[in-house]
Image (spheres, rainbow, N blue to C red):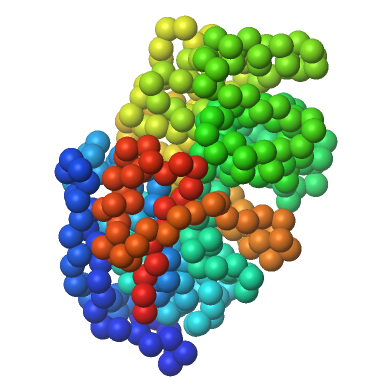
Amino acid sequence: MFSMSSKVELSEVMKSVVVHPTSPISTTITTIAVPTSLEANDVLIKIHAAASNPKDWIHLVSRGFSLNSGDDLAGVVAALGSDVTSLQIGVRVAAFHPMGQPYGAYAEYATAPEHTIFKIPESMTFEEASTIPLVSLTAAITLFRRQGFAAPWKPEAADKNDKPLLVYAATSALGTFTIRLAKLAGIGPIIAIGGGSSAYLSTLLDMQDVLLDYRSGMDKVKQDVRQVVEDRKLSLTHAVDAFSENGSWVDVSQMMDGGILSVFSGANKYDDAGSPGNVQVLYTYVGTGHDGAYKPGMPKQPSAEDAQEDVDFAVGFFKWLEMVLRQGKFSGHPFEVIPGGLDGVAEGLNRLRDGQARGRKLVYQIPA
């Protein structure tokens, strides 16, 4: 069972969106019961805003099934599982909902485990907060688990992280959150490769960093990267391909001096000819923050033991994230509100599918 309070009015039923893998993406709004019991560590949240991620449509299309695929949300705590100790009814929170599980973010209520929830500062809107949970954890697992940098709350971060990092598709939400975390952890210089929406990205970089435009052509970008590396006498052994489509990882790997290249699409095998043999490709699956394991058949996995430790890492990360948000050292991504609340989810997902987000997270306001 769970505990609740009159501070938050709890409905018996709620509206919930089912996303269908049609072309274009379509949705239906259903009425389902609000959960009357929770797992011991789960929290029921009355949603005020939800945000979309590309995987919200990509996973459904690749697997051919329908469900409420939203996993980024912000709202108010409505009920607590029996073992939840860090939250109270009525607190403003944002959460990463477990992917593919019931009670997702495109609804009036959602559930999430306590360890992937953070309290929202009073100065932050629900809309901005909803842009943070999933993509920030993806970036954090990439940098501080797969890439091997020290987490920013670790005392050794200042000494261990003084290394260059290349970020391809740096103007994407994943690219910019990766850079935000890298800067807070003392990683650098950053070699950022982006395109449109570079004005916002430029605010995250400093004088030691380099911003290159992929629209100049991949051969020119490779030449420019090598020039930076040679001029500064760097060894480029850490790179993030936040695009991970159309063989982009092959080009990125050719810019490196060996080391680790992080990728994010589970649809590729990453065994392409042309990638240097001294570059290790590792796929980041953010679901390990909940389950501590990759799904069968996923490419380029770390060891099972390493993946198991991602759950404990997520606990520490969300506690740290709450602190730096409160201190004003971290913030959400630029966003655009799609009109219509839950009725707007189909429009948002189709815009993501068609590459029309323009460097912004697409957010839906869920009226009370």
| Horizontal side of residue 265 vs 144, given as left or right | left
* Image point (55%, 51%), residue name: 333
Which of the image's four quarters has the C terminus? bottom left
Coordinates of residue 19 in the picture (x, y in percent): 23, 53
| Horizontal side of residue 23 vs 259, given as left or right | left
From the viewer's perspective, is residue 140 above or below residue 162? below
- Quadrant in which residue 323 is drawn: bottom right
From the viewer's perspective, is residue 302 above or below residue 64? above
From the viewer's perspective, is residue 44 above or below residue 58? below
Residue 46 appears in the picture as rendered: yes
* Image point (65%, 33%), residue name: 148
Residue 306 appears in the picture as rendered: no
Coordinates of residue 195 in the picture (x, y in percent): 54, 30
Outermost residue on the right side: it is 159
Coordinates of residue 275 in the picture (x, y in percent): 49, 11
* Image point (40%, 32%), residue name: 265
Q: How many marks?
A: 0
* Image point (73%, 63%), residue name: 327
Which of the image's four quarters has the N terminus? bottom left
Coordinates of residue 257 in the picture (x, y in percent): 65, 13
